[in-house]
Amino acid sequence: MAGVFEVEVDGVEHDHGLQHHDDNSQFDVSQLSPEEKWRVEHARMHAKHKGHEAMHAEMVLILIVTLVVAQLVLVQWKQRHPKSYNLVTLFQMWVVPLYFTTKLHWWRFLTIWFIFSVITAYISYRATRKPLACTTPRLVYKWFLLLYKISYATGIVGYTVVMFTLFGINLIFRIKPEDAMDFGVSLLFYGLYYGVLGRDFAEMCADFMASTVGYYSASGMPTKHLSDNICAVCGQPILVDVSEEGIIENTYRLSCNHVFHEFCIRGWCIVGKKQMCPYCKEKVDLKRMFSNPWERPHVMYGQLLDWLRYLVAWQPVIIGFVQGINYVLGLE
C-alpha cells in the first residue's frame, strides 16, 4: 500500500518544490523520486524540531563536555594501565563493527570478518603455545605483514577512487557518482579497519612470542644470552651474513650491532609497533633500516591507524553514553 503524507510547518503547508496531488495537499510518497523523498523528510524534520532551539543547544553542550571528559579519562587510563586499555580497545575494535554490520545486514563485511577472525584466532593460538614451535614466529609475522600490506593497498585504492570520483573521472567510464563513491569509501573502510585490527593483534602476539623465546621481557633483563648468529625475535640461526644478498631474505644489523632476520625485524618494528631492539631495547632508527623511500609511508600509515582506533573503538561508546544522558534528561 502506498504511503501518503501531508507536511505542514507553522500552519502553512509546504511542498518544497513538490506538486500537490489533491486539495488537501496530500501526495503519494511511493511515486516520488529519491530527491523529492529527501525533501519530504527534510520538511518533516524541520516541522518536528521547530521551537526546540534551547534543547538542541543543551544537547550540543552535553556532547562537547562528554567528548572532552572522555578524552581525558582515556588518556589517563592509557598512561596508568596500558595493558588493560589495549585489551579493552582491541575487543571493542573487534566487536563494535560486528554489531552495526549485523544490524544493517552487511553480509559481505560479515563474511570477511569471519574469515579474518578464524585465521587470526589460529595464528594467535599458535603464538601463545608453550613451548613455542620454531616455525611459529615466522608464520605469525608472515600473516600479519601480509594483512598489513593488503590493508594498506586497499586503503590507497579506496582513497584514489574517492578522489577520482570527486574530480568526475568516473564519468569517463560511465559509472554513477554514488556507485563510485560507495565503492571507494567501502575499500577505504576495509583497509583502515583491518589495518588497525591487524596491528593490535600483531603487537599482542609479538610481545607474547618474544617473552616465550626468552630474549625479550616487557620489564626487566633478557632471560637468555644472545649469540652472534641467533635472531633475538624468532630464536633461529642466522644463515646469511649482513654483507651478503639472501635468496629469500636478508640479514639486518641495527645501530646497536645486534643482527636479525630481515623479515623478523621488519615485523617486530612495523607490524608489532616495536621501535626498539628486541634484545637490548635500544631505539631503532627506522630511516636507516628502510633505505627505499617507497617503504617509509608505511610508518606514516601506522600513525594514521593509531588515530583511527579512537574513532572506531571509543566514538560509538561515547555517542551512546551521550544519548543515554539525553534520554535520562528527557532531551530529544
Image: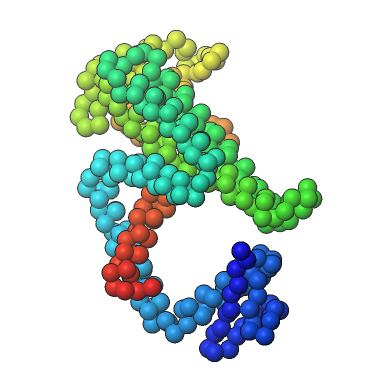
Residue 59 figure quarter: bottom left
Could you tell me residue 316's position as x and y percent? 39, 55
Which residue extends farthest left? 220
Residue 153 figure quarter: top right
The quadrant of the picture occupied by the N terminus is bottom right
Q: Please indicate whether residue 321 sits to the left or right of residue 8 in the image.
A: left
Residue 229 figure quarter: top left
Residue in the foreground of this view, choosing between 92 and 69: 92
Residue at x 47% of width, y 37% of height = 113
Residue at x 69% of width, y 67% of height = 31
Above or below — where is 112 with respect to 62?
A: above
Q: Please indicate whether residue 269 sits to the left or right of residue 153 in the image.
A: left
The colour style of the image is rainbow
* Residue 31 appearing in the image: yes
Residue in the foreground of this view, choosing between 14 and 93: 14
Could you tell me residue 187's position as x and y percent? 58, 44
Could you tell me residue 172's position as x and y percent? 79, 50
Above or below — where is 85 with respect to 6?
A: above
* Residue 307 appearing in the image: no
Q: How many marks?
A: 0
Residue in the foreground of this view, choosing between 129 and 324: 324
Residue at x 36% of width, y 27% of height = 124
Could you tell me residue 79's position as x and y percent? 25, 48
The quadrant of the picture occupied by the C terminus is bottom left
Which residue extends farthest bottom? 11
Residue at x 39% of width, y 56% of height = 315
